[in-house]
Every structure is written in structure tokens, then in C-alpha cells.
């Protein structure tokens, strides 16, 4: 009886786990300056459509990870004391994918900006793939799929 209950529970939870991992993407990277990694840099990503913001701090090696990002286009802003502000616009994130964005900060006042325009088609430096997925169709199909419930659970 316990084995049957375990099998049923596994079958019910598997679609939920699959839906959670396939509906979001992530961005990883490092922040560095002329002398190497910049720990504690502030990394902010903003969804261009909804204007939702997420902020993380770079770790001791200058690395950062922002996970659970809904697919769409984003603006990335990186700041650190004594460096120019780095801004990358139109970063495209797709569901179920990890993207890499390494940031090289230039010495200068934080009020000075270095802007990078990523564009709609982005080369994924993690896998080397060219990303040309059309957002609306993917967003509709992903959100529709994830809102369906499994009939036996």
C-alpha cells in the first residue's frame, strides 16, 4: 500500500516540478573591472514589459545568478562604487534556458553610463546558440500549458 501511495504521489508531483523548471529562465555572469572581480557590485534586472525589478549582489568572485525569470526582454544595470554604471538593454530570456552576461566595468563616476544594446536575437554564450524565439507565441503556449492541472491529482 505504501508503494502504491508513493507511486501516485510521484506521478502527481512530477508535472508540477516539470512546469516550474520549464516556465522560467536564468541569467548568470561575473562583474569585473580592470583589476579583476568586483565583489558586492549591485546587479539589477528589470522586465521591460512589466517593469518588475530584481536586485542581487555579486559574490566574492564577482559572480551573480538571477533565476526564475519569466521569458521576455530585460534591462540589466550593474553599479559599483568608483565605476561607471553598466546598462544592457533588450536582453532576451527564454523559458528553460540559462544565459550568460559577463560585465566589464570601467573606472569612473557611478553617474556615467556604458550602455549595451543586446537586440532581439541573442547569442547564448553558455551554449553558443542563436536565440530567435518569438515572444508572444511562446509566452501564450507556456502560460497556457502551466495553468492546466493534471486530472488525477
Image (tube, rainbow, N blue to C red):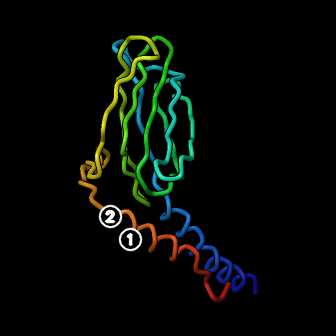
- Taking 107 as reference, is 122 left or right? left
Residue 110 lies, with reference to residue 69, above or below; the image says: above
| Residue under the point 61% across and 83% down | 150
- Taking 103 as reference, is 128 left or right? left
Q: Which mark is residue 137?
A: 1
The image shows residue 28 at horizontal and vertical percentages of 43, 41
The one nearer the camera, 59 or 9, is 59
| Residue under the point 53% across and 69% down | 18
The image shows residue 116 at horizontal and vertical percentages of 31, 33
The quadrant holding residue 87 is top left
CB contact under 8 Å: marks 1 and 2: yes
State the SS at label 1: helix
- Taking 135 as reference, is 127 left or right? left
Q: Quadrant of the C terminus?
A: bottom right
Residue 145 lies, with reference to residue 1, above or below; the image says: above
Q: Quadrant of the N terminus?
A: bottom right
Residue extending furthest toward the right: 1
| Residue under the point 45% across and 32% down | 77
Badge 2: residue crowd in 10 Å (few <14, some 14–19, many ≥20): few
Residue 130 lies, with reference to residue 148, above or below; the image says: above
Q: Which mark is residue 134?
A: 2
State the SS at label 2: loop
The image shows residue 27 at horizontal and vertical percentages of 44, 44
| Residue under the point 40% across and 66% down | 136
Q: Rounded to the nearest whole Å, what is the CA distance between mark 1 and mark 2?
A: 6 Å
The image shows residue 98 at horizontal and vertical percentages of 40, 50
Amino acid at each position: 500500500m505504501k508503494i502504491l501511495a508513493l507511486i501516485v504521489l510521484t506521478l502527481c508531483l512530477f508535472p508540477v516540478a516539470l512546469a516550474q523548471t520549464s516556465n522560467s529562465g536564468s541569467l548568470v555572469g561575473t562583474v569585473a573591472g580592470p583589476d579583476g572581480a568586483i565583489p558586492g557590485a549591485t546587479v539589477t534586472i528589470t522586465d521591460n514589459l512589466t517593469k518588475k525589478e530584481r536586485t542581487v549582489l555579486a559574490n566574492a568572485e564577482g559572480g551573480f545568478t538571477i533565476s526564475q525569470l519569466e521569458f521576455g526582454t530585460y534591462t540589466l544595470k550593474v553599479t559599483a562604487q568608483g565605476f561607471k554604471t553598466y546598462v544592457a538593454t533588450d536582453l532576451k530570456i527564454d523559458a528553460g534556458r540559462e544565459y550568460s552576461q559577463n560585465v566589464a566595468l570601467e573606472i569612473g563616476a557611478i553617474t556615467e553610463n556604458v550602455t549595451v544594446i543586446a537586440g532581439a536575437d541573442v547569442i547564448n554564450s553558455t551554449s553558443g546558440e542563436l536565440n530567435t524565439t518569438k515572444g508572444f507565441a511562446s509566452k501564450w503556449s507556456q502560460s497556457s500549458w502551466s495553468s492546466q492541472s493534471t486530472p488525477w491529482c
